[in-house]
Amino acid sequence: MEKTEDRFDGIRKKLIELRESLIRESKAEIVCILTQRDYHDGVSDDGDLADIAVRDSVQATQFTRHQSQLKSVERALSRIEEGTYGICEDCEGEIPIGRLNAMPFAVRCVECQAGYEIMTDLSSS
């Protein structure tokens, strides 16, 4: 029988590449945030301040999204090592390989993910 690690070797490589990319992007974002000049100099009106606030918000959101994706990638890599990768967290059925190729850090099959999103939407309303 094929080991889980061998079965998902291509996906594992894809996850490692994604992790490296997310780390690079996060480092670049941190450097950008830390090295920005005092761009409040020369601000002439509320419109300029609003532009700065939006830019800061976008940067923070992007960094947070990258960190969340990085955690998902790390979790997927751990699941490969543990032999639990490709198993739906909700129904414990097998997640189709096509879904894992498209979304290598998926933790649910399509049906369970759809139900999860509906429940999440209902609870946030």
Image (cartoon, helix red, strand yellow):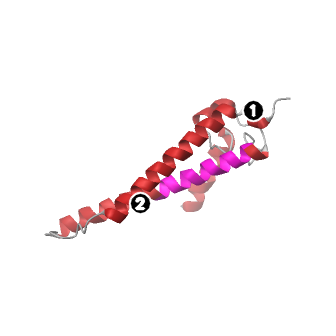
Residue 114 location (% of width, % of height): 62, 44
Main secondary structure type of the part rendered in magenta: helix
Side of 50 relative to 34 (left or right)? left
The image quadrant where one finds the N terminus is: top right
Q: Is residue 60 visible?
A: yes
Q: N-terminal of the two: label 1 or label 2? A: 1
What stretch of residues is rendered in magenta? Answer: 64-80
Residue occupying image coordinates x 40% and y 56%: 29
The residue nearer to you, when weighing 77 against 87, is: 77
Residue 101's quadrant in the figure?
top right
Residue occupying image coordinates x 75% and y 37%: 5
Residue 65 location (% of width, % of height): 49, 54
Residue occupying image coordinates x 55% and y 61%: 124
Q: Which residue is mark 2?
A: 30
How crowded pointer 2 is (Cα within 10 Å; few <14, some 14-19, many 20+) is rated as: some
Q: Callout 2, which amino acid?
A: Ile
Q: Residue furthest right?
A: 1
Residue 4 location (% of width, % of height): 78, 36
Residue 26 covered by magenta stretch: no
The disc placed on residue 6 is 1
Query: Is there CB contact under 8 Å for labels 1 and 2?
Result: no
